[in-house]
Amino acid sequence: MSGEVIDVDTPEKRKTLWIVLWLNVAIAVGFFITGFIGDSNALFANGLDNTSDAAVYALSLLALTRSRVWKRGAARLSGIMLLVFSAGVIIDAVRRFLEGSDPVGIMMMGMAAVAGIVNLISLVLLKRLQNRDVNLRAATTFSFNDFVANGGIFLAGIVVLFAGANWPDLVVGIAVAGIALYGGIEILRDAHGDMHEDAQTAHTSLTDGFRK
């Protein structure tokens, strides 16, 4: 790719977001199919994660011509979606732990490798965007989280393949949920900070109060 930087609110920017959106839709479908066939919590978790990512990119496209308040609202919705997603993945992991599962290691490795390449492309495209608002920063957070999670799935697939146990799949699934939980909290904090920046007011945390 070239070293050009895409300006804010240009046709190139909208094109980039559309590309990233459809890449995530395709990867989410792939994760759901392989997660179902391969009986994998980790793959299913990433399918839900990429689905929420696609929703975020759709919100980012809608937010391009909207007010800063609307963008903050979209970012908050993104953060809440991640928190809900995290709870769903953890519940599914507990179910698989109690009922048992038989994940397919080679399928986990293959899907994680493909998704890792796609998420890396998405991350590079988003990093090229200049002067990113709170909603686009949320989108970048999602892609980075996905890239890290794919590495974990690949490693878990190796252990599952050679050990024949399901616990690596469950551990990574919960880890993906944890990453999503952290990302959701960061997005909500970023949106809160953006509100203070927009209002030109100082944000005082509880710890600041104790220091006084």
Image (spheres, rainbow, N blue to C red):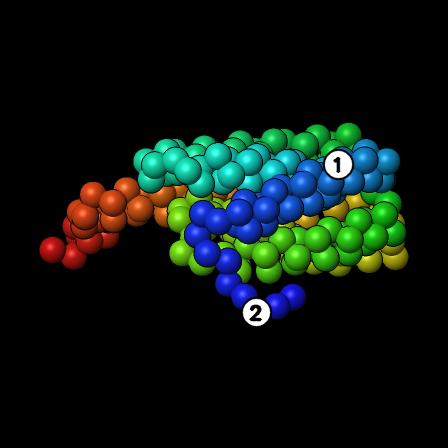
* Residue depicted at 62% across the width and 47% down the height: 20
User: What is the x, y in percent for residue 126?
Assistant: 55, 55
SS at mark 1?
A: helix
Q: Which of marks 1 and 2 is nearer the N terminus?
A: 2
Any mark on residue 148, and which?
none
Any mark on residue 29, and which?
1
User: What is the x, y in percent for residue 162?
Assistant: 88, 57
* Residue depicted at 19% across the width and 48% down the height: 200
Residue 31 placement: quadrant: top right
Taking depth in this image into account, of 2 and 92 the one nearest to the observer is 2
The answer to whether residue 58 of the structure is visible from this angle is yes
Quarter occupied by the C terminus: bottom left
Residue 157 lies left or right of residue 212; in this view the side is right
Amino acid marked by disc 1: Val
User: What is the x, y in percent for residue 96?
Assistant: 74, 34
Mark 1 crowd level (few <14, some 14–19, many ≥20, 10 Å Cα): some
Mark 2 crowd level (few <14, some 14–19, many ≥20, 10 Å Cα): few
Quarter occupied by the N terminus: bottom right
Q: How far apart are marks 1 and 2 (CA)?
A: 31 Å
Residue that lies at the very extreme toward the bottom in this rendered image: 3
Amino acid marked by disc 2: Gly
Residue 133 lies left or right of residue 128; in this view the side is left
SS at mark 2?
A: loop
Pointer 2: what residue? 3
